Amino acid sequence: MYRFLILITLIFAPLTANAQSVAPRDGWQVFPTSYSYGKLVKRTRSAISKAPIKVVTQASATVGAKSQGIKIPGNIVLGVYRNDYARRMLAASVAAGIEAPIRLYVTENDDKTATLSYKTPSAVFAPYMNEGGAKLDELAKELDAVLLGIAIKAASAP
């Protein structure tokens, strides 16, 4: 009987994953909010639509899990970029191309609020600065400002 309980626990533990807040860390911007996950996703998309950048990719483990009948806390990754940013990046460093698009991450917290977080473009492109030089540094700083503007609009009070 004991082995059976361990087996059941191991099988169902992944199905009951707990939400965790994204903790601040080097190279990241983290914006805890009082908004629900759904509301923060909408606010983030709205802020992006008003910024000089567009959503070019998106992925959500929440949606994928739901299609398999599994409920997990809300999360979505929104990849944002623009073709002229890509051309500038590639002119400075072809290797840096692996990092595009820049990603924003909306996660649901245990208390049903949500957090918006992202790795800053300066941190994302840091490993390529030796070959990318001033041109890549300039682009990274420009993108730092764009993403910060999106985050402030999305996470601020209405």
Image: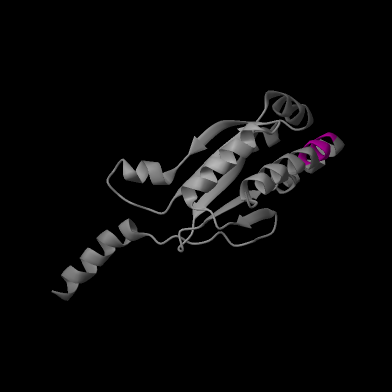
User: In the rendered picture of this protein, how many numbered marks are placed on residues?
Assistant: 0
- The location of residue 17, given as percent across then percent down, is 37, 59
Q: Is residue 22 magenta?
A: no
Q: Is the image coloured rainbow, by chain, by secondary structure, or in one colour?
A: one colour
Q: Residue furthest front?
A: 158
Image location (x, y in percent) of residue 35: 53, 53
Q: Is residue 13 left or right of residue 27?
A: left
Q: Quadrant of the N terminus?
A: bottom left
The residue stretch that appears in magenta: 135-140
Residue 81's quadrant in the figure?
top right
**29 is higher (above) or lower (below) than 67:** below
Asked if residue 58 is positioned above or below residue 17 in the image, the reply reads above
The quadrant holding residue 48 is: top right
Q: Residue at x 72, y 43 (%)?
A: 149
Q: Position of residue 36 (x, y in %)?
A: 49, 53
Task: Using the rendered image of the protein, determine whether residue 101 is visible from the camera's viewpoint.
Answer: no
x 75%, y 46%: residue: 122
Residue situated furthest bottom in the rendering = 2
Please state the horizontal and vertical placement of residue 112, each as a whole percent of the image. Answer: 45, 59
Image point (67%, 54%), residue name: 28
Q: Nearer the viewer, residue 152 or 77?
A: 152
Query: Is residue 119 at least partly visible in the picture?
Result: yes
Q: Nearer the viewer, residue 1 or 40?
A: 40
Q: Residue furthest left?
A: 1
Q: Is residue 26 left or right of residue 67?
A: right
Q: Is 145 placed above or below 88 here?
A: below
Along the line of sight, the residue nearer the viewer: 27 or 73: 73
Outermost residue toward the right in this view: 134
Our reading of the magenta stretch's main secondary structure is helix
Residue 45: image quadrant is: top right
